[in-house]
Image: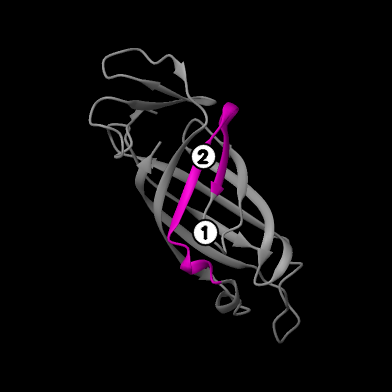
């Protein structure tokens, strides 16, 4: 994956490059060399319902989350945080930008609900970070949220899209 520069960085002064297992910081024209985790990128997000056959979104309110922060650590570790009702998620990111993260938290007032997020970090042709997309599943184990009228439990599934707002 190529060099990445966050819009909050002064133009052409700091480039973040993703190498397998870590972000590296360097100046334009120089060779990468300084390990920099943790570093974080904030994304302005839109979250829409993909599937919610049991009608939980009015109680979950995940579509109200407008920003996410993705923090990168050592060995491809990531943490994805956001304002309530977002549940903090941890996982790993691959060298192609794909990731899987999960966590447990309060969803629609139910504690300990498993939430999963599978997606990809997006880059432009120059390797600049541009966005994040993926699928978020609330109650991935189908065990917490109430069943529908037929007695069937279904998770709430969301599409997540975001554009890079800042990097630090």
Q: Residues within 10 Å of mark 1 (few under 14, many from 20)?
A: some
Is residue 131 highlighted in magenta? no
Residue 107 percent across, percent down from the top left: 65, 67
Q: Among all residues in the image, which is located at the extreme left?
A: 11
Q: Is residue 5 left or right of residue 71?
A: left
Is residue 74 highlighted in magenta? yes
Determine the image quadrant of residue 16: top left
Q: Identify the element where label 2 is drawn.
A: strand
Determine the image quadrant of residue 155: bottom right
Query: At x 33% / y 26%, what residue is drawn?
Result: 15
Does residue 41 lie above or below 147 as drawn?
above
Residue 162 percent across, percent down from the top left: 39, 53
- Residue 139 visible within the image: no
Determine the image quadrant of residue 41: top left
* Residue at mark 1: 83
Which mark's residue is nearer the viewer, 1 or 2?
Answer: 1
Q: Is residue 106 left or right of residue 97?
A: right
Q: Nearer the viewer, residue 88 or 102?
A: 88
Q: Residues within 10 Å of mark 2 (few under 14, many from 20)?
A: some
Residue 138 — which label?
Answer: none
Q: Is residue 66 left or right of residue 60?
A: left
Does residue 151 lie above or below 139 as drawn?
below
Does residue 98 lie above or below 68 as drawn?
above
Instruction: Specify the segment rendered in magenta.
Output: 61-80
Residue 71 — which label?
Answer: 2
Q: Is residue 59 left or right of residue 152?
A: left
Residue 1 percent across, percent down from the top left: 39, 28
């Amino acid at each position: 994956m190529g060099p990445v520069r966050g819009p909050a960085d002064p133009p052409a002064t700091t480039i973040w490059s993703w190498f397998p297992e870590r972000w590296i910081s360097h100046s334009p024209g120089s060779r990468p060399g300084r390990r920099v985790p943790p570093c974080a990128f904030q994304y302005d997000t839109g979250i829409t319902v993909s599937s919610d056959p049991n009608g939980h979104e009015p109680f979950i309110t995940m579509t109200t989350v407008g920003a996410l922060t993705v923090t990168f650590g050592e060995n491809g570790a990531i943490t994805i945080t956001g304002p309530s009702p977002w549940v903090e998620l941890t996982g790993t990111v691959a060298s192609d930008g794909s990731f899987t993260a999960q966590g447990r938290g309060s969803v629609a007032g139910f504690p300990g609900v498993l939430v999963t997020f599978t997606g990809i970090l997006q880059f432009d042709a120059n390797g600049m970070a541009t966005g994040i997309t993926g699928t978020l599943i609330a109650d991935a184990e189908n065990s917490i949220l109430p069943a529908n009228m037929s007695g069937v439990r279904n998770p709430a599934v969301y599409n997540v899209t975001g554009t890079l707002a800042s990097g630090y």
